Amino acid sequence: MLFVTGITGHTGRWFLDRLIKENYQGKIRCLVRENSNTEMLDKSGLSIEKVNGSLTDKTFLESSMAGVKIIVHISGILFSNNVVEAAIANNVRWAILVHTTGRYSKYKSASDEYIRIEDDILNLRDKISITVLRPTMIYGSSKDKNMFKLIDYLYRNKIFPLFGEGENLMQPVHAKDLGYAYYDVLLNKDKTLNKEYNLSGKRPIRYIDLVKCVSQKLERKNYIVNLPLWFSIISAKIYNKISKNAIISVEQVLRMQEDKDFDYENATKDFGYSPVSFEDGIKEEIKEYLDNFEMQRL
Ligand SMILES: NC(=O)c1ccc[n+]([C@@H]2O[C@H](COP(=O)([O-])OP(=O)(O)OC[C@H]3O[C@@H](n4cnc5c(N)ncnc54)[C@H](OP(=O)(O)O)[C@@H]3O)[C@@H](O)[C@H]2O)c1
C-alpha cells in the first residue's frame, strides 16, 4: 500500500497524472482534506482509497497508515515530523519526503527551521528508510505561488522595479518535472532509497534574464528599473506598510540577492531526471494567463 499526502496540490496532480499514464497497479491511499478538490482522483481509474483529515491531527495520521509500506509525502516539511512519527508507529518501510532547497539559504530566518526538522528526521534512518527531495522554486501554472504573480505584474504594469542588480541565479523547477520525479524516485528504489536529491530546472538563469524572458513571452514592453539595494529595502518596508496585497517582503528583497542554483546530477544518474528549461517551461503558464485574461475581458 502506497500512502500519499498532497496529491491534490500543484505537483501532486502531476504525480497522479504519471501514475495514471503508467497504469500503476498497486493500492494507493490518499490523505485529503474535507474540502480538497478530488475530482482527478475520483476519475483516475486507479485503485485509490481516500482518507479525510488533516496532517496536523497525529491520532488520525497514525490510524490512517495501517498496512502502508511506502509514503510519498508532498504536503510540506512542516508536517514531516507528524508523518514520520506515524509512519514509524505503523512499521512503514520507506518515506519519500518533499522538502525544500530553502535549507541552503544563508538567512537563518529562512533556513533554520527547515534544517532542524530535516536533520532530526534524517537521524531516524535506523527506524525507517528516508529519501528527501528538495525542490527549488516551483512554477508551471496558475497554481504556483510565485511566477504567476510575476506574470500578472508584468502584464499589468509597464515599469518593473528590480531590487539590486538582478545578477543572482535562479533555477526554478516545473511542477510537471517534479511530480514525474516523485514517480521515478518511487520506481528506482534500489538507487533512491535513503538518498537526498535537489530538484531544480534545466539550468540556472539570472533573475534579470528570467524577468526579461517572461516580459518577452508576454509580448509586453516592460522597463526594468534597477533600484540600489539600500533604496530597495526602504521601499519594500514602505510598500508593505501601505499595500494589503504586497507581492514582496523586505526579507524577500534580501534573499533575492542570493544565488538559488542547485545541481541535480545525482538525480539524473539515479532516475534519469531531465527537467525542462525555464524558457520552455514558462510558455504554457503564460498561455494560461493570457487565455484567462482574455476570458475575463469577454
Ligand atoms: N512553492 C514553491 O516554490 C516550493 C519551493 C520548494 C518546496 N516546496 C514544497 O514542495 C512541495 C510540493 O509543492 P506543491 O506546489 O505541490 O504544494 P501545494 O500545491 O501547496 O499543495 C499542498 C498539498 O498539501 C495539502 N495540504 C496542505 N495542508 C494540509 C493539511 N493540513 N492536511 C492535509 N493536507 C494538506 C493540500 O491539500 P488541498 O488540496 O486541500 O489544499 C495540497 O494537496 C510542498 O511540500 C512545498 O512546501 C514548494
Image (cartoon, helix red, strand yellow):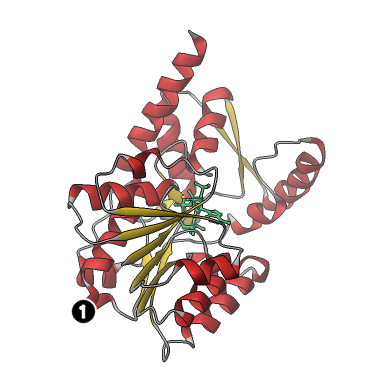
Residue 270: x percent and y percent?
22, 72
Residue farthest to the bottom, as pictured: 126
Residue 89: x percent and y percent?
48, 81
For the N terminus, give its image quadrant: bottom left
State left or right for residue 39 relative to residue 35.
Answer: left
Could one spot residue 174 in this view of the protein?
A: no
Name the kind of residue labelled 1 in the image.
Answer: Asp
Q: Quadrant of residue 194?
A: bottom left
Q: Residues within 10 Å of mark 1 (few under 14, many from 20)?
A: few
Residue nearest the observer in this picture, 126 or 117:
126
SS class, disc 1 = helix
Against 256, residue 264 (above or below) is below
Could one spot residue 185 in this view of the protein?
A: yes
Against 17, residue 292 (above or below) is above
Residue nearest the observer in this picture, 5 or 161:
5
Against 13, residue 125 (above or below) is below
Residue 28: x percent and y percent?
32, 59
Write the residue at 17% across / 52% down: 22
Residue nearest the observer in this picture, 277 or 221:
277
State left or right for residue 106 relative to residue 2.
Answer: right
Q: Quadrant of residue 251?
A: bottom right
Residue farthest to the top, as pictured: 298
State left or right for residue 18 relative to residue 119.
Answer: left
Write the residue at 25% across / 50% down: 46
Task: Determine which residue is flagged by label 1.
Answer: 190
